[in-house]
């Protein structure tokens, strides 16, 4: 998602679907770097679901994250699932609201 200069509250949901696998952890977050979770030092939080041998799927919400930018910037919804066997697919949506 491209955001113009300003302050934004950004959130999203990652939906994990399993096929013949067992998932133990699912994580979602907001980032200004593709395929990378931000760390706590940047003020960005990630949401993690500890799952006990889930075999169907789950949705994980990324916490509302304040993004303050001086110029147009790409913001990403990122997700990660730890699983064994089979495959896991992920899809999601990202939402942004200008604060001021």
Image (cartoon, rainbow, N blue to C red):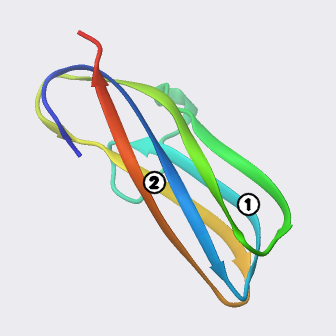
- Residues marked 1 and 2 touching at CB (< 8 Å): no
Position of residue 97 in the picture relative to residue 36 (left or right): left
- State which quadrant residue 3 falls in: top left
Q: Which residue occupies 50% across, 68% down?
A: 90
Q: Which mark is residue 25?
A: 1
Position of residue 60 in the picture relative to residue 50 (left or right): left
Q: Which residue occupies 50% across, 48% down?
A: 13
Q: Which residue occupies 45% across, 54% down?
A: 78
Q: Is residue 34 above or below residue 39?
A: below
Mark 2 crowd level (few <14, some 14–19, many ≥20, 10 Å Cα): many
Q: Which circle's residue, 1 or 2, is located before the other in the chain?
A: 1
Q: Which mark is residue 40?
A: none
Position of residue 25 in the picture relative to residue 12 (left or right): right
Mark 1 crowd level (few <14, some 14–19, many ≥20, 10 Å Cα): some
Q: Is residue 74 above or below residue 55?
A: above
Query: Residue reaching furthest top?
Result: 100
Q: Which residue is mark 2?
A: 78
Q: Which residue occupies 56% across, 31% down?
A: 40
Query: Residue reaching furthest front?
Result: 56
Q: Is residue 17 above or below residue 71?
A: below
Image coordinates for residue 75, horizontal then vertical, percent: 29, 43
Q: CA distance from mark 1 to mark 2?
A: 14 Å
Image coordinates for residue 92, horizontal then vertical, percent: 44, 57
Image coordinates for residue 15, horizontal then vertical, percent: 55, 60
Quadrant location, the C terminus: top left
Helix, strand or loop at mark 1: strand
Image coordinates for residue 16, horizontal then vertical, percent: 59, 66
């Amino acid at each position: 998602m491209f955001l113009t200069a300003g302050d934004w509250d950004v959130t999203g949901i990652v939906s994990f679907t399993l096929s013949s696998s067992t998932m133990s952890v699912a994580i979602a977050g907001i980032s200004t770097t593709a395929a990378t979770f931000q760390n706590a030092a940047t003020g960005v939080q990630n949401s993690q679901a500890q799952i006990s041998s889930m075999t169907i799927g789950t949705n994980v919400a990324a916490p509302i994250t304040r993004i303050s930018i001086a110029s147009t910037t790409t913001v990403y919804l990122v997700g990660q699932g730890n699983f064994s066997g089979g495959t896991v697919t992920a899809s999601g949506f990202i939402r942004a609201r200008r604060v001021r």
